[in-house]
Amino acid sequence: MAIDFLPTVWAARLLVALEKALVYGQANVSNRDYEGEIREAGNTVKIGSIGDVSIGNYVKNTDISDPEVLTDEEQSLLIDNAKYFNFYVDSVDRAQANANIMDEAMRRSAWSLRAAADSFLASTMEAAVPGGNKIGSVGTPIVPTKDDAYEYLVDLGVLLDEGNVPTDGRFVVVPAWFHGLLLKDDRFVRSGTFRGDVRLANGEVGEAAGFRILKSNNVPNDAGTKYKIIAGHAMATAFAEQVVDVQTYKPEKRFGDAVRGCTSTAPRSSGPTSLAMIIASKA
């Protein structure tokens, strides 16, 4: 008797991948003040600043000092961190599929580029935190509990206060397990969690100790230990990105379609006193 072969059928829907929330690149964590200038022309922005102005005592009928010559400082925001994607879909696979593979592949590629930028930005912030603004160390990390996790946030706020960081707009990015400790503290539960009807930014889970609390799985850590919980203000870190190029093309020796793209990013932490950090391990 003849053998009937049953063809494999593609599902009309693609399985949605689980994706981490992207936190560090959003506007309230790092600023995009110079991104427009980079996108319009060039890959470097020179950022100028001036030093403090001295204050003197005025005595009636007495000449004041000669005008002070202001000092200036220049920093560069350079687009020099480039990432790319390059994928291919065979014509046979595309013809047999009910789902739109190309669209989903493009979405996943875009998300992966953003995820890489988010992790790189987190590492940039971590490296910029001055030694005096760290609670705990890599050698001796703190081990917060449900009873004192909130208090460590208060300590972070004090460090930023001492650095004259504006109180409005402060953030802290915590891993899921630290957020779990906060949820066991009545001080956070009573006043820190948002009402259900409030629209939250990506990763935002509440407010506590003067901070917007954001939760992320991109918190820098050493193999799941010694998490670097970064707090600060968006004034500390500038971030810019460019979509360099996106191309569709036909591979010379294949029947199918391919897409490749490249982006460049430039993170820079230019105000390190506006950042503080807890180095912590799970209990």
Image (tube, rainbow, N blue to C red):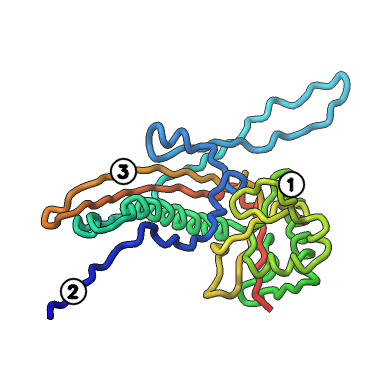
Q: Secondary structure at mark 3?
A: strand
Q: Earlier in the sequence, mark 1 or mark 2?
A: 2
Q: Earlier in the sequence, mark 3 or mark 1?
A: 1
The label nearer to you, 3 versus 1, is 3
**Mark-to-mark CA distance, 3 and 1:** 41 Å
- Residue 240 visible in the shown view: yes
Give the answer, above or below, for where 220 lies relative to 192.
below
Reading the image, the residue beneath label 1 is 164
Q: Is residue 120 left or right of residue 233?
A: left
Give the answer, above or below, for where 9 lies relative to 206.
below
Reading the image, the residue beneath label 3 is 245
Give the residue displayed 44% in from the left and 44% down from the top.
241
x, y percent for residue 261 = 31, 49
The amino acid on which the numbered mark 1 sits, given as a three-letter code, is Asn
Reading the image, the residue beneath label 2 is 4
Quadrant of the rendering where the N terminus is positioned: bottom left
Give the answer, above or below, for where 31 lies relative to 176.
above
The amino acid on which the numbered mark 2 sits, given as a three-letter code, is Asp
